[in-house]
Image: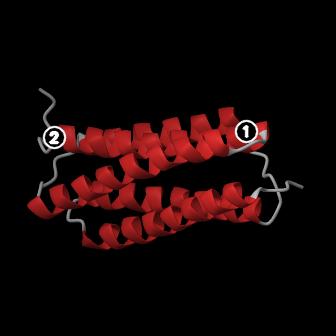
Amino acid sequence: MINLSQKERMLLEDQKSHEDACVKKYTKYAEEANDPALKQMFLNHANKEQEHYNTLNQILNGQLPNITQEQGQQNQQSASQNVMQSFTSESSCSQKDADLCKDLLMTEKYVSSTYNTTIFECRDTNLRQILNHIQKEEQQHGEDIFNYMQSKGMYNVQ
């Protein structure tokens, strides 16, 4: 059982609303995307965002879920490898897909940054570790989108 301060509760409620927005965006954009590989990546990320939302609900209800860092990293790595393999297949690249990716990459950058503030404001070490785990997954989502965009010529690093 965890006792949250008013500030921790407020920040966690904000994170929960961000996760809710991510679930909705990824789900909607999966319906709109043209590339089947992009659709699948968006659906995978929507499912992970829903897990984040559920975890935050547990925390706000006073329970600290047991998240195994190693297990989460292995699951995320295999999901990312599957995503990258699907990028190499030939598929059309549309401006709409590029716009969806740009919006979601911007969203992931923002959400990851807000986790940073929330982590530093939490008193409990275990809570910090859980939020850090979620933040790493958010960063992985951003990396997946970045890699997709780069593979399709939508994002050029100079």
Horizontal side of residue 75 vs 5, given as left or right: left
| Residue with the most extreme top position | 158
Kindly tell me whether residue 51 is visible in this rendering: no
The picture places residue 150, in percent across and down from the top left corner, at 19, 38
Q: How many marks?
A: 2
The foreground one among 142 and 125 is 125
Q: Which mark is residue 101?
A: none
Which residue shows up at 26% across the image and 44% down it? Answer: 148
Q: Could you tell me if the residues under marks 1 and 2 are in contact, i.e. CB atoms within 8 Å?
A: no
Name which residue lies at 17% across and 59% down. Answer: 99
| Location of residue 3 in the rendering, given as x and y in whole percent from the top left corner | 85, 56
Instruction: Give the vertical position of 30 relative to 146 (above or below).
Output: below
> Along the horizontal axis of the image, is 115 left or right of 142?
right
Rendered-image quadrant of the C terminus: top left
Q: Nearer the viewer, residue 132 or 51?
A: 132
Dot 2: element: loop
Residue 58: x and y, percent? 75, 62
88 or 114: nearer the eye? 114
In 3D space, how far apart are the residues under numbered discs 1 and 2 (Cα atoms)?
Answer: 33 Å
Quarter containing the N terminus:
bottom right
Asked if residue 25 lies left or right of residue 9, the reply is left
Q: Residue furthest front?
A: 6
Q: Residue at x 80, y 52 (%)?
A: 64
Q: Give the number of the disc on residue 155.
A: 2
User: Residue 89: x, y in percent?
Assistant: 22, 44
In the foreground, 80 or 95: 95
Instruction: Look at label 1 and name its amino acid.
Output: Thr
Q: Residue 68 — which label?
A: 1
